[in-house]
Image (spheres, helix red, strand yellow):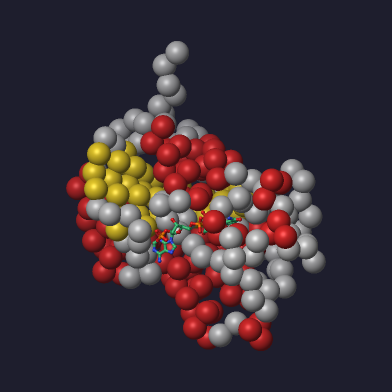
Amino acid sequence: MSAWTPLTGQVAVVTGASRGIGLAVADVLHGAGAHVVRLARSLKDATSERRTDVRCDVTDQTQVERAAAMALKVGAPDIVVNNAGMFFIKRLAETSAGDFAAMLAVNLTACFLVARTFLPAFHKRGRGHLVTIGSVSDHHAFPGSAAYASSKFGVRGLHEVIAAELAGTGIRTTLLSPGPVDTTLWDEVDPDSTPGFTKRAAMLKPSDVADAVLFAVTRPARVNVDAISLLPAVYTPRD
Ligand SMILES: NC(=O)c1ccc[n+]([C@@H]2O[C@H](COP(=O)([O-])OP(=O)(O)OC[C@H]3O[C@@H](n4cnc5c(N)ncnc54)[C@H](OP(=O)(O)O)[C@@H]3O)[C@@H](O)[C@H]2O)c1
């Protein structure tokens, strides 16, 4: 049986693709035939069969522009996935100004930088798909989430404004908002031994999120999947 490769000939850029959700998204898009350009701070610049890795801190405009130049050498990007992110739980009183700024830099400002840097290539061809990984925290408030929710509510706002500005262009945008996913993002919280959190075994897997990205980017060109909310089947938002 031959593999399903609907993305053959396409170039997909994924930020934060060294592990977790971003790595799973990159692998699924690669499996569907795309040439995948992975960005992360811990990756070394490298190219192999339909894979290009770029060491890139997405909070740094110069590094994002360098990554875009390297991606364009592969080919004009068809898909850009804004995934890189960080997470911590601290109540407002324990959140320093530095904590807050660091969270916004990665989860929000970097999405703006990546969108602004890559969208001109979409406009040039009149097509492209920008996928943003939000969170249940882009629309639900949890105690201890002042910084995270501010960044994720912000990224939902950014997605909605970009979608409004792109109306009528044929360029597609998707906000994918997952509930808890079993990745290293949860290591500090240690949800299995902390009451009130979804246990790792009940969480979504990175491949579940990757499958949802694949669904969105493989719809016919007339279809725009504006938003996807993905929650574990057994899930109660903590109070
Ligand atoms: N896990 C969840 O429960 C969950 C739920 C909803 C939404 N999300 C969102 O999903 C996204 C991915 O989360 P994850 O769970 O896969 O986290 P993760 O396992 O901690 O991976 C985070 C990724 O982001 C990259 N990254 C962090 N800072 C970066 C920077 N400044 N520049 C470039 N890359 C950077 C990391 O690579 P390097 O360290 O190599 O740079 C890594 O590849 C995040 O936006 C997160 O908010 C996660």
Give above or below for 211 relative to 39: above
Q: Position of residue 29 (x, y in %)?
A: 42, 38
Task: State the residue lying farthest toward the front.
Answer: 193
Q: Residue furthest top?
A: 1
For residue 68, above or below residue 90: above
> Where, by quadrant of the figure, is residue 35 drawn?
top left
Q: Position of residue 110 (x, y in %)?
A: 41, 66
Residue at the image position 35 percent from the left and 50 percent from the top: 38
Q: Residue placed at 79% from the left, 55% from the top?
A: 236
Where residue 213 sits in the image (x, y, percent)?
Answer: 51, 43
Q: Is residue 225 visible?
A: no
Q: Nearer the viewer, residue 165 or 153?
A: 153
Pick the quarter of the image with the N terminus.
top left
Q: Is residue 153 left or right of residue 69?
A: right
The quadrant the C terminus occupies is: bottom right
**Foreground: 198 or 102?**
198
Task: Determine the image quadrant of residue 87.
Answer: bottom right
Q: Is residue 69 left or right of residue 35?
A: left
Of residues 59 and 168, the one drawn nearer to the viewer in this rendering? 59
- Residue at 50 percent of width and 73 percent of height: 104
Q: Is residue 94 above or below residue 211?
A: below
Q: Can residue 31 be seen here?
A: yes
Measuring from the top left, give residue 24's x and y in whole percent.
Answer: 48, 43
Q: Is residue 237 left or right of residue 154?
A: right
